[in-house]
Amino acid sequence: MADPIHERDLTGKALDLVAEAAGPYLESLTTRPVSDPGAEELLGELGGPLPEHGDGTVAGVARLLRTGTRAATHSAGPRFFHFVVGGATPAALAGDWIASLLDQNPGNWAASPFGTQAETVVLGWLKDLFGLPESCGGVLTTSATSANFTALSAARFWWAERHGVNVTVDGLAGLPPMPVFSSGYVHVSTRKALQMLGLGRDTVRRFARDDAGRVDLPALDRALTETDGPAVIVANAGEVNTGDFDPIDEMAELAERHGAWLHVDGAFGLFAAVSPRTRHLVDGIERADSVISDGHKWLNVPYESGFAFVRDAALLGRAFGAWDAPYLPGDGDDHVNYQFLGPDSSRRARALPIWATLRAYGREGHRAMVERHLDLARHLGRLVEEAPDLELLAPVRLCVVCFRYRRPGVEDLDGLNTRLGAELLADGRVFAGTTVYRGMTALRPAIVNWRTTEADVEQLVSIVREIGARLAG
């Protein structure tokens, strides 16, 4: 019993359990709360000491399903607005199951020609979808943070090479600090990537012309003029509090004039390129040296799906390099080997759910989804503006709506909205937590889930007003 080889004939039965649970669970997402307030009590079912003698395949899987379908946060549903998180389209979910079934390692061609080719195909499709040059190099990553890490690794190699150092071989010793400039919109994932690269989380210089964080281009221009040597500029496509954009085209002009590297963090905002209605927001991305985005946001594929693109395709290989291991492919290999283009060696076939959803719905299907979400965000913005006890704090530009609850006579609106955000999450019917925007505590629901409808955003407004009124007394 202890050795799984004795239960190999039970694989089908275990998968049948999952398939049987999947239908009712997925159907329930349109009506069930995002979180059950009593679900935390169920988490104890996961614990206990490591079993000396296991439950067996079927019993173990049944236990995990029973606990998971009740205690999980149902973030794949239509009312999870708390972070910029999509669900998984039917095709993407099936593609992810196929990835687990086939269990490929597309780190190199020898290990999986199928997985490697699928990654090459989807990278090409994504460049086409976003309007990036076909000649760009690219690699799939686990997230936007790892995509930023990957792209900025290429930028770091480029920058060090201009100081006469091969940073892949020799490291950073003896080099000056790498200048990194951005607007006030720079995201924590960019800073975390810089931290992991040994460049310092807090070395980013921010040039903002107001307390919202909008870029001060003249100040950025002056700083680039005064900088000794090359610099890296980070432009932000889709700021997390409001969905606003840096002027990428104008920042590209500055980068070209000063010989700087332009990196675009488009974790969710890059999808503005999919619709003619919002394409102008990302004008200039084709001029960037590196661009990243995240599939488990607006592409609606399961987690661990980031993309990094670099204009000089050779730089990814030089930044991550062959590892001089005799059992791995060498530089002379005729096939692409993605383990040499990013941080992961062994890597899941994360291209398969992307391939499945792009093949299933195509450019038009994804454009239609993006535009439906744009309409929903504007609908939510109108509902907020029409409500006497809600205040819209920023124009609705994309898929994020930034607003707060207000009541005449309440002086501590920040405290009220902080309590409101906590109550929303504890209540569980909808998920929309708080942020701080221009010094004000606010809600910032993001609409990127393929299941979300007008009824869902209307329910969000109704529950916010209900809980707000109760808290305000």
Image: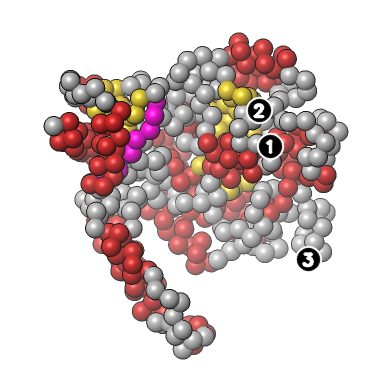
The answer to if 434 sits in the magenta stretch is yes
Amino acid type shown at disc 3: Tyr
* Count of numbered badges drawn on the protein: 3
Q: What element carries label 3?
A: loop
Residue 207 place in picture, x, y as percent: 57, 19
Which residues lie in the magenta part? 429-437
Q: Mark 1 points at which residue?
A: 199
Position of 369 relative to 37 (above/below): above
Between residues 280 and 71, which one lies in front from this camera angle? 71
Q: Label 2, on which residue?
A: 180
Q: Which of marks 1 and 3 is nearer the N terminus?
A: 1
Earlier residue among tags 2 and 1: 2
Query: What residue appears at the point 77 percent right and 59 percent down from the top-left corner?
Result: 329
Q: Residue 327 carries which label?
A: 3
How packed mark 1 is, by other alpha carbons closer than 10 Å (few <14, some 14-19, many 20 or more), is some
> Element under label 2?
strand
Kind of residue at disc 2: Val
Residue 410, position as x, y percentages in the image = 20, 23
Q: In this view, does 206 lie above or below 368?
A: above
**Residue 179 appears anywhere in the view:** yes
Q: Is residue 132 magenta?
A: no
**Residue 395, x across and y down, in percent:** 35, 20
Q: Distance between the residues labelled 1 and 3?
A: 32 Å
- Asked if the residue at tag 2 contacts the one at tag 3, i.e. Cβ–Cβ closer than 8 Å, the answer is no
Give the image quarter of residue 408. Answer: top left
Q: Going 45% across and 52% down the picture, which residue do you hit?
A: 302
Give the CA separation, mark 3 to mark 2: 38 Å
| Labelled pair 2, 1 in contact (Cβ < 8 Å) | yes
How far apart marks 2 and 1 lie (CA) works out to 9 Å
How many residues crowd mark 3 within 10 Å: few (<14), some (14–19), many (20+)? Answer: few
Q: Is residue 125 visible?
A: no
